Image (tube, rainbow, N blue to C red):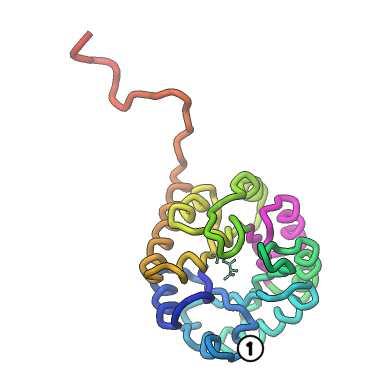
């Protein structure tokens, strides 16, 4: 999954989405609604016949706001030709400095949106108990953050994300903070089902190239997870057989 924010141009955005190989693109409902300079034409710049839209509630500080914006997002998806799209990336973020999600607001909004038939993809701190509660409530995924949005700090919550992955019965999408392809691969090697990456691509010197690198790393990480890594050992073990040596 990729985002649509922070690109220098819509052209760069389109090229990056294509180069990444992503299947889902998230769009802030409020950006599509404003039609202000820099936002106008955003939704129209993407071919929604090929890409699944994930409307998000960015900018919402309370559960009530998020529920309202999610409903608008569903209408927006319909207008853009995705009549059966009931997805919403739920963001309830009252904190402007670290952009950390409000767990109680997220829980309350998720409960309401699940009741209304949404496929809810909640953006959360990497809290295993919260992830479980959201799953039990009927959320379609959980989206724990690797580190704060746009920080490029990578996977700072690896231990907690590992617990979420161990327990989850729904797909786990690692969202936010991924700064490099190696961090994308790391999250996938841990067993994440998907990633959401925006800033590291959009703000790269060459966004499309970084998008491709992120896509390749995501696939590499997934393959490595499926292949099964070797156990880490304290001591060396020789690569060549020890029997039949020339020297005694
Ligand atoms: C676009 C979006 O949904 C972001 O809020 C998301 O969390 C990605 O974070 P990064 O920008 O750190 O990749």
Q: Dot 1 surroundings within 10 Å: few (below 14), some, or many (20 or more)?
A: some
Q: Is mark 1 within 8 Å of ligand 1?
A: no
Disc 1 is placed on an element classified as helix
Q: Position of residue 64 (x, y in %)?
A: 80, 76
Residue where numbered disc 1 is placed? 33
Q: Position of residue 224 (x, y in %)?
A: 44, 47
Task: Residue at 60%, 56% (x, y): give it.
Answer: 147
Residue 128 among those drawn in magenta:
yes
How many numbered callouts?
1
The verdict on residue 234 being magenta is: no
From this viewpoint, which residue is outermost toward the left? Answer: 246
Q: Is residue 109 left or right of residue 88?
A: right
Q: Which quadrant of the view contains residue 136?
A: bottom right
- Left/right placement of residue 211 relative to residue 106 reads left
Instruction: Answer above or below: position of 148 versus 77.
Output: above
In the rendered structure, the answer to whether residue 48 lies left or right of residue 35 reads left
Quadrant position of the C terminus in the picture: top left
Q: Residue furthest top?
A: 248
Span shown in magenta: 119-144
Q: Can residue 214 be seen in the rendering of this structure?
A: yes
For residue 92, what is the image quadrant? bottom right
The answer to whether 87 appears left or right of 221 in the picture is right
Q: Position of residue 199 (x, y in %)?
A: 51, 67
- Pinpoint residue 155: horizontal percent, then vertical percent: 56, 52
């Amino acid at each position: 999954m990729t985002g649509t924010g922070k690109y220098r141009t819509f052209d760069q955005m389109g090229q990056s989405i294509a180069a990444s190989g992503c299947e889902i693109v998230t769009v802030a409902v409020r950006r599509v609604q404003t039609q202000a300079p820099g936002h106008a034409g955003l939704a129209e710049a993407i071919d929604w016949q090929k890409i699944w839209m994930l409307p998000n509630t960015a900018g919402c500080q309370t559960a009530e706001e998020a529920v309202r914006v999610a409903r608008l997002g569903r209408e927006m998806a319909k207008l853009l030709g995705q009549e059966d799209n009931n997805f919403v990336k739920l963001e309830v973020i009252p904190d402007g400095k670290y952009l950390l999600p409000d767990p109680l607001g997220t829980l309350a909004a998720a409960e309401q949106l699940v009741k209304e038939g949404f496929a809810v993809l909640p953006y959360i701190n990497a809290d295993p108990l919260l992830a479980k509660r959201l799953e039990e409530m009927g959320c379609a995924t959980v989206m724990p953050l690797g580190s704060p949005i746009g920080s490029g700090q990578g996977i700072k919550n690896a231990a907690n994300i590992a617990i979420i992955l161990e327990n989850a019965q729904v797909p786990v999408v690692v969202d936010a903070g991924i700064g490099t392809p190696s961090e994308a691969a790391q999250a996938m090697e841990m067993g994440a089902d998907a990633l959401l990456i925006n800033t590291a691509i959009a703000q790269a010197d060459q966004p499309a190239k970084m998008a491709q690198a992120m896509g390749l790393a995501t696939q590499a990480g997934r393959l490595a997870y499926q292949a099964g890594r070797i156990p880490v050992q304290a001591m060396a073990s020789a690569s060549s057989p020890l029997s039949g040596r020339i020297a005694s």
